[in-house]
């Protein structure tokens, strides 16, 4: 269990990047979802022991990490947002080098551990190729290989899917969900689909604060009956967005399909009720200036559903 208590980080400036984060994360995949600048990387880097918090506590399996960060290093794998590469090394050489830096030992030697890890992330075929010839997805998998070396309890993955094509993204999703079967995997992302695909639990962070901690199902349920979809002509879209709480506006076959949040049972003319998706819930939470009452109503629904979800889990 990873426990974070009242974590604060103020950068010189001052920039209050984390304004008191409280979070408990158990085994499995957990998503930390938030827009750019929300404080995700700051939190990930503090958890990885690369950055000191201004104040607060972190413990992993009961060990206080903030006081003795060396306790976490052996139990932690970290894939940073910008994973540094030595482009002229082969994948195999680079991985072996990283394992050496990390101080990972293996009874059978680093060479065989390297082969084992490359196999695990499906890169054996490219072991002898220079890293500069790797695709974005292959580089991420090499990053995962070094992160999982030493079989850590906690793996931290910061924005791993940015820049991957759909096939590479799917492959990474599979690998991450496999890894989450017997450890904590903390995934930071600004992409709602990453959370919808992978995470049975997630938290939303904005401006250094956690807005909500919930499950994708509860978040969708909280909006049931309040999301409507319809067509809006392109020349009316801007005006429409001023009048309604739009969660998504996408082009389908050249026409604007628009989804709105309307909790009071009074949708725009011609709009039909639809099943809410996670993107709707996220955008209702994120909308700048969205009335405090909207958020409060949503939080209340989320809270009720969260309690129901936990109760049904306990009953099992
Ligand atoms: P995210 O990963 O969610 O995009 P970050 O943790 O990178 O967010 O940043 C959170 C806030 O802290 C932003 O306002 C960012 O500009 C600021 N910030 C990040 N790193 C530094 C730094 N080294 N010095 C000053 N401000 C920083």
Image (cartoon, rainbow, N blue to C red):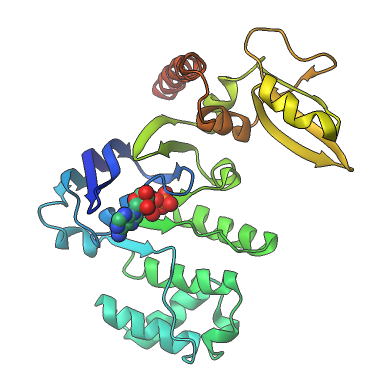
**Residue 107 rendering spot, x and y as whole percentages:** 28, 81
Residue 231: name its quadrant.
top right
**Residue 41 rendering spot, x and y as whole percentages:** 37, 54
- Image point 55% across, 33% down: which residue? 282
Q: Identify which residue, 79 or 264, lies in the foreground.
A: 264
The single residue placed furthest to the right in the displayed view is: 253
- Image point 49% across, 87% down: which residue? 87
The correct choice, above or below, for 128 with respect to 240 in the image is below
Q: Quadrant of the N terminus?
A: top left
The correct choice, above or below, for 74 with respect to 187 in the image is below
Is residue 307 visible to the viewer in this orientation of the structure?
yes
Residue 145: name its quadrant.
bottom left
- Image point 32% across, 84% down: which residue? 108
Residue 306: name its quadrant.
top left
The single residue placed furthest to the top in the displayed view is: 265
Q: Quadrant of the C terminus?
A: top left
**Residue 267 rendering spot, x and y as whole percentages:** 74, 13
**Residue 117 rendering spot, x and y as whole percentages:** 44, 75
The correct choice, above or below, for 233 with respect to 186 in the image is above
């Amino acid at each position: 269990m990873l426990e974070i208590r009242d974590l604060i980080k103020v950068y010189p400036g001052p920039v209050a990047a984390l304004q008191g984060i409280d979070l408990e994360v158990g085994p499995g995949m957990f998503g930390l979802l938030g827009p750019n600048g929300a404080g995700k990387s700051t939190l990930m880097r503090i958890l990885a022991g690369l950055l000191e918090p201004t104040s607060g506590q972190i413990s992993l399996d009961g060990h206080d990490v903030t006081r003795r960060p060396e306790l976490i290093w052996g139990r932690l794998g970290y894939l940073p947002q910008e994973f540094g590469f030595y482009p002229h090394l082969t994948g195999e050489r680079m991985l072996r080098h990283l394992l050496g830096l990390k101080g990972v030992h293996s009874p059978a030697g680093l060479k065989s551990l390297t082969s084992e890890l490359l196999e695990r992330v499906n890169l054996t075929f490219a072991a002898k190729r220079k890293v500069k010839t790797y695709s974005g997805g292959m580089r991420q998998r090499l990053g995962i290989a070094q992160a999982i070396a030493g079989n850590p309890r906690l793996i931290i993955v910061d924005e791993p899917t940015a820049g991957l094509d759909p096939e590479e993204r799917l492959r990474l999703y599979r690998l991450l969900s496999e890894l989450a079967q017997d450890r904590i995997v903390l995934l930071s992302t600004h992409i709602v689909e990453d959370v919808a695909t992978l995470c049975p639990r997630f938290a939303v962070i904005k401006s250094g604060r956690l807005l909500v901690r919930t499950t994708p199902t509860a978040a969708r349920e909280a909006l049931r009956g309040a999301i409507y979809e319809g067509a809006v002509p392109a020349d009316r879209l801007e005006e429409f967005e001023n009048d309604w709480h739009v969660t998504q506006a996408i082009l389908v076959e050249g026409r604007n399909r628009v989804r709105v949040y309307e909790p009071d049972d009074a949708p725009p003319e011609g709009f039909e009720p639809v099943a809410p998706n996670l993107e709707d819930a996220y955008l209702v939470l994120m909308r700048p200036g969205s009335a405090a009452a909207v958020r409060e109503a949503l939080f209340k629904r989320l809270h009720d559903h969260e309690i129901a979800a936990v109760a049904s889990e306990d009953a099992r």
